[in-house]
Image (cartoon, rainbow, N blue to C red):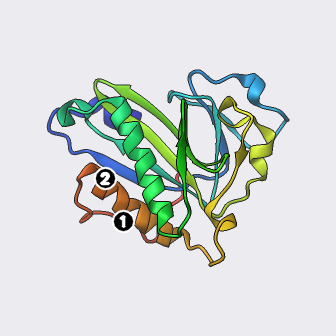
């Protein structure tokens, strides 16, 4: 993401990367190491995104948005709202009523957080993005103070009765990303999607 953003130019196409990560904690630029509550063998990586500490792992779908905001004449707040809308609209497919919380980026179901958001903008272009908890082991979240907040994390598989396919969620999320931001979905590769190294 850093290299793509650093070397892109005014005619570089925007890209959205939809993927999963192996288990890892990432600590944003404003992150506080005191929000790591217990020792862990899970790697902790310093990230250049905004925000505090978060967890990524299999069963969580991540959308990295590499978008030229200047070219789109779009501000960061519009991007944040758009990404939150993508998740809210995707979850409505399963009749899950999700919402925003004032001054807390991300998406919530009631008071539990289901999607975390962190971005970086360089030369008017965004990278990093949003992660949606689908069907994952939530226990690593107990090792940290998610996003530096006293909040509970939840996931889609705990909110609906049916079996949740990560690939099905990925397809719906990708379609919502393309619809919300006005991109064609012709080059999307969503099944299967990979775990990034």
Decide which of tag 2 and tag 1 comes sooner along the chain.
2
Q: Is residue 197 above or below residue 43?
A: below
Residue 109 or 192: which is nearer the viewer? 109
Residue at (41, 46) in percent of width and height: 83
Residue 194 or 52: which is nearer the viewer? 52
Q: Is residue 116 visible?
A: no
Spatial separation of the CA atoms under disc 2 and disc 1: 18 Å
Residue 126 appears at what percent x and percent y? Answer: 35, 34
Residue 81 or 178: which is nearer the viewer? 81
Residue 96: quarter of image: bottom right
Residue 110 appears at what percent x and percent y? Answer: 64, 50
Report crowding for label 1: few under 14, some 14 to 19, many 20 or more residues within 10 A (C-alpha): some
Count the marks: how many? 2
* In front: label 2 or label 1: 2
Q: Is residue 35 visible?
A: yes
Is disc 1 placed on a helix, strand or loop? loop
Residue 137 appears at what percent x and percent y? Answer: 73, 58
The quadrant the N terminus occupies is: top left
- Is 175 on the left or on the right of 11, as rendered? right
Residue at (46, 64) in percent of width and height: 170
Residue 159 appears at what percent x and percent y? Answer: 66, 65
Report crowding for label 2: few under 14, some 14 to 19, many 20 or more residues within 10 A (C-alpha): some
As drawn, the label of residue 180 is 2
Q: Are marks 2 and 1 in contact (CB under 8 Å)?
A: no
Is disc 2 placed on a helix, strand or loop? helix
As drawn, the label of residue 189 is 1
Residue at (47, 69) in percent of width and height: 93
């Amino acid at each position: 993401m850093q290299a793509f953003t650093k070397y892109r130019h005014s005619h570089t196409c925007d890209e959205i990367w939809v993927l999963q990560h192996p288990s890892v904690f990432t600590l944003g630029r404003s992150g506080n190491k005191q929000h790591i509550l217990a020792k862990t063998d899970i790697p902790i990586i310093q990230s250049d995104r905004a925000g505090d500490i978060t967890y990524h792992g299999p069963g969580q779908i991540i959308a990295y948005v590499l978008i030229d905001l200047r070219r789109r004449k779009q501000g960061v707040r519009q991007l944040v709202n758009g990404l939150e809308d993508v998740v809210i609209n995707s979850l409505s497919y399963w009749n899950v009523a999700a919402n925003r919380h004032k001054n807390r980026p991300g998406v919530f179901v009631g008071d539990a957080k289901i999607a975390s958001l962190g971005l970086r903008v360089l030369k008017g272009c965004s990278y990093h993005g949003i992660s949606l908890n689908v069907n994952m082991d939530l226990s690593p979240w107990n090792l940290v103070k998610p996003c530096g907040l006293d909040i509970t994390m939840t996931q889609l598989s705990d909110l609906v009765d049916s079996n949740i396919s990560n690939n099905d969620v990925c397809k719906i999320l990708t379609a919502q990303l393309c619809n919300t931001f006005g991109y064609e979905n012709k080059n999307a590769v969503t099944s299967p999607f990979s775990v990034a190294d």
